[in-house]
Amino acid sequence: MSMPSPDLDEICGTLIDLAYRAGEIIMGALPATENTGSKKNSADLVTVYDRAVEDMISSELKDKYPYYQFYGEETYDPARPLTNAPTFVIDPIDGTVNFVHGFPHACVSLGFAINRVPTVGVVFNPFTKTLYSAVRGKGAFLNRTSQLPLKRSNVEPLGGLKDSLISVEWGSERTGRNWETKIRTFERLGQSQENGGAMVRSMRSLGSAALNLCAVAAGTLDLYWEGGCWAWDVCAGWIILEEAGGIMVGGNPDEWEAEIDGRKYLAIRAASSQRSQKELVEEFWSTIQGRLEY
Ligand code: LIP
């Protein structure tokens, strides 16, 4: 079958419809432990609902767009890496630990990448009924109507780390060099300046890469740093961030070109000048204690 060139607005509409359907499955879920299993450890969970949502989304997308690739968390096969082909990059439930605990920060994250570049993104949190969406070149929106970033971040210039509310994640890997790098960096970020720290205003962990990226896109967080998450966690949020004027770079110093499956990311919100975004990137990189290796 010959491949038509993608109609990005139409794809965005389809992904929004699927996000609402996924939201119904998520909100109808039974909070029972027999529905939950772990992958590599007790902090890396999967539920029957992750699989049910991915099954529904993949069968709809494969039916409607048989010529595009599908790359989803629950059917991930390391032998089939993400290619340049147009690909749906999907996390059926991002924030699974939150979902299992009923903590209302979980979402369905639906991305579409071309040449490994995030191009369409839809993120829906059914607990708060919050929908973020973006198509490359067409802006990013909250609930389809309010353009991102929200007004507050247009008027506030981006400050340094000491003026920032940032987001970091613990991840599920709790030993080894990446863990050491993270916790030493967290310490440096929080510590007083007299003691050599950056003393950020505070740190949050929303538990979902997609929702962290959307919060940076909205401008309610200044920055988000994580190592260890995957392409399906970031694809949709990445284009929403960029269309809101934010930037995405790599999670280690000097990684100005972030790779979609590079597994370490630093996102900065929109700012009045590009220079201050780059200054904040460099200030953040200089606080990293060690190096993330994924
Ligand atoms: C989660 C990510 C989060 C990370 C968690 C987990 P999941 O994805 O969004 O950023 O810190 O360890 O990987 O497993 O909920 O889809």
Image: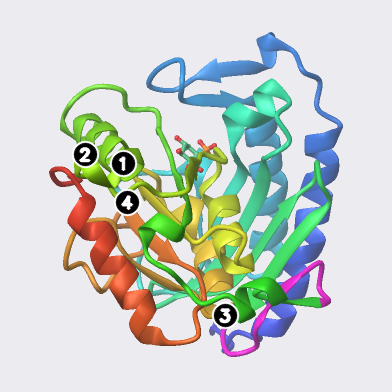
Q: CA distance from mark 4 to mark 3?
A: 21 Å
Q: Around disc 2, counting alpha carbons within 10 Å, would you say few (fewer than 14), some (14 to 19), or many (20 or more)?
A: few
As shown in the figure, which amino acid type bears the numbered disc 3?
Answer: Glu
Q: Which residue is mark 3?
A: 243
Q: Which residue is mark 4?
A: 263
SS majority, magenta: loop
Q: Which residue is mark 2?
A: 195
- Percent from the top left, x then y, of residue 199? 35, 46
Q: Is residue 100 above or below residue 79?
A: above
Q: Is residue 225 left or right of residue 93?
A: left
Q: Is residue 22 left or right of residue 113?
A: right
Q: Nearer the viewer's eye, disc 4 or disc 3?
A: 3
As shown in the figure, which amino acid type bears the numbered disc 2?
Answer: Asn
Q: Nearer the viewer's eye, disc 2 or disc 4?
A: 2
Residue at 51% from the left image edge and 39% from the top image edge: 205
Q: Is residue 152 above or below residue 33?
A: below
**Mark linked to residue 204:** none
Say whether residue 153 is magenta: no
Q: Earlier in the sequence, mark 1 or mark 3?
A: 1
- Percent from the top left, x then y, of residue 201? 47, 48
Residue at 33% from the left image edge and 42% from the top image edge: 228
Q: Is residue 256 left or right of residue 172?
A: left
As shown in the figure, which amino acid type bears the numbered disc 4?
Answer: Arg
Q: Which residue is mark 1?
A: 192
Residue at 64% from the left image edge and 61% from the top image edge: 62
